[in-house]
Amino acid sequence: MQERVAIVTGAGSGIGLATARMLAERGYALVLAGRDAGRLGRAAAACGRSPRVIAQPTDMSRPDEVERLVRTADERMGRIDVLVNNAGDGRLVPIDETGESELRRAFAVNTIGPALAIHHAWPVFKRQKSGLIVNVSSVAALDPFPGFFAYGASKAAVNLLGKSAAKEGAAFGVRAFTVGPGAVETPLLRSLADERTVPPEVCLTPDDVARVIVRCIEGERDAANGRVIYMVRESAGVREWVEG
């Protein structure tokens, strides 16, 4: 039985690292992508139960590096079963300060990078007649926090990437899901908001989100194929709802 292979972007910390560790525990071979080579190496070491792990430093805002990531996975692993588009970047920038360079930066990382990863993986999926995509979006695509003018729009576009991939890929066995979490306790969140502004008790954990991603991969959320699974933490626990 061939080992299953997953690409996970933004794997150096947070949701990406949590997802990679859960997939390793389930026997997936992994290609881990991230900008920080040091963190990526530590993430690879944390996935000790995986049969094979490749750490591929990748800046998702650079098209050549995205192409190289997918090509490396295909050439060295021989197949790609799963693509987790988790890498992203968020900044709080008022609209009057959101010029062309800020818009290009937000969309390059959050939308164009994931879209190109899907584009390059598509011939592999067609060759295999199977494949699965999980894109990580955000509740900001529904209700952007002030300052998320570019970020929220870039994540709303990610939602449609998943819907399009599910529709077009149905002819040859491709499924696509989008997971849109609210605030998640990660270094990125804390670079934007302190604990007074966003208390820890209202934050999801990376593991909360990774569990939903893995359930999509493992076939437990097939009813949400092509749709967005939103999730937030409330006083009663984690609440999920599906839109799209």
Image (cartoon, rainbow, N blue to C red):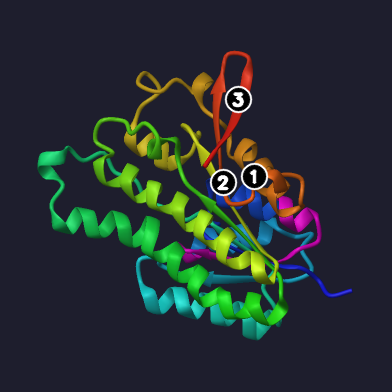
Q: Nearer the viewer, residue 129 or 203?
A: 129
- Placement of 18 over or under 30, stated as above or below: above
Q: Quote the CA–CA distance across marks 3 and 2.
A: 16 Å
| Residue 57 shows in this picture | no
Disc 2 marks which amino acid? Arg
x 55%, y 82%: residue: 71
> Which comes before the other along the chain, label 3 or label 2?
2
**Secondary structure of residue under mark 3:** strand
- Residue 218 shown left or right of residue 148 in the figure: right
Q: Circle 1 sits on which residue?
A: 224
Q: Circle 2 sits on which residue?
A: 227
Queried whether the magenta region covers residue 83, the answer comes back as no
Image quarter (top left, top right, bottom left or bottom right) of the N terminus: bottom right
> Which comes before the other along the chain, label 3 or label 1?
1
Q: Circle 3 sits on which residue?
A: 239
x 48%, y 39%: residue: 186
Q: Quadrant of residue 95?
A: top left
Q: Nearer the viewer, residue 224 or 59?
A: 224
Disc 3 marks which amino acid? Arg
Q: Residue furthest top?
A: 235
Disc 1 marks which amino acid? Ala
**Secondary structure of residue under mark 1:** helix
Residues marked 1 and 2 touching at CB (< 8 Å): yes
Q: Position of residue 15 (x, y in %)?
A: 56, 46
